[in-house]
Image: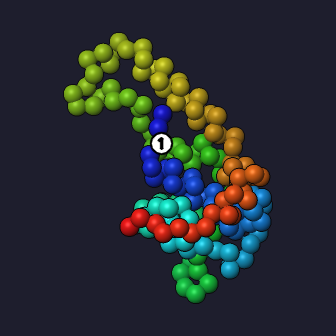
Amino acid sequence: MRMTASTDLALRVVMRLAVANGDGNGNAGGDAASMPTTREVAAAMAVPYSHAAKVVTRLQHLGIVEARRGRNGGLTLTDAGRSTSVGWLVRELEGVRDVVGCEDDPPCPLRNACRLRSLLRQALEAFYSTLDPVTVEDLVASPTGPVLLGLAARPAAS
């Protein structure tokens, strides 16, 4: 399975926010001064601002990220975001779909007698079940957290 670029970026954004709003070792904390903006996160991840903004909006709708406007504004990971299952988050971002397009137009002529389709579903569920017990907080434990904090803002592609 290959995740979409949006899901990949969303995971990197939540990881970056987990350390930006914490102590760099995956622990909660931080203050308003440590709340990065969407533009700053986009620059640190070397992605276009418009792509980062779409991902942040989706994460807000899921209750994972909170965005505040204004002088003391920025992005913060919610408590639910910090403790959310990576498996759940990837499922929500990717949506439910088959690994292969058995029902595409035109549909596969083997779809009613195919053994591969059920095997691929089992493999996909094994992928998710590996991610289910892992939380966002787990992802940013050392040595990852300090590396994420060290990401300097780079000019993003427009």
> At 58% across and 87% down in the image, what residue appears?
71
Tag 1 secondary structure: loop
Is residue 67 visible in the rendered image? The answer is no
Above or below 140: residue 41: below
Residue 92 in the image, given as x and y percentages of width and height = 51, 48
Residue 7 place in picture, x, y as percent: 49, 50
Query: Can you give x and y, in whole percent of width and height, for residue 135 in the image?
Result: 69, 48
Type of colouring = rainbow
Provide residue 93's location: percent of width, then percent of height: 49, 49
Which quadrant holds the C terminus? bottom left
Left or right: residue 94 versus residue 144 is: left
Q: In this rendering, is residue 6 above or below 17?
A: above
Which of 21 and 45 lies nearest the eye of the viewer?
45
Q: Residues within 10 Å of mark 1 (few under 14, many from 20)?
A: few
Looking at the picture, tell me which residue is in the foreground, 95 or 39.
39
- Residue under circle 1? 3
Q: Is residue 144 visible?
A: yes
- Count every numbered label the image shows and give the total: 1
Could you tell me the amino acid type at mark 1? Met
Q: Would you place residue 6 above or below residue 99 in this image?
A: below
Foreground of the two, 6 or 46: 46
- Relative to the observer, which residue lies in front, 47 or 68? 47
Q: Which residue lies furthest to the left in this view?
A: 106
Residue pushed farthest bottom?
71
Which residue: 42% across, 14% down? 115
The image quarter in which residue 23 lies: bottom right
* The quarter of the displayed image where residue 77 is located: bottom right
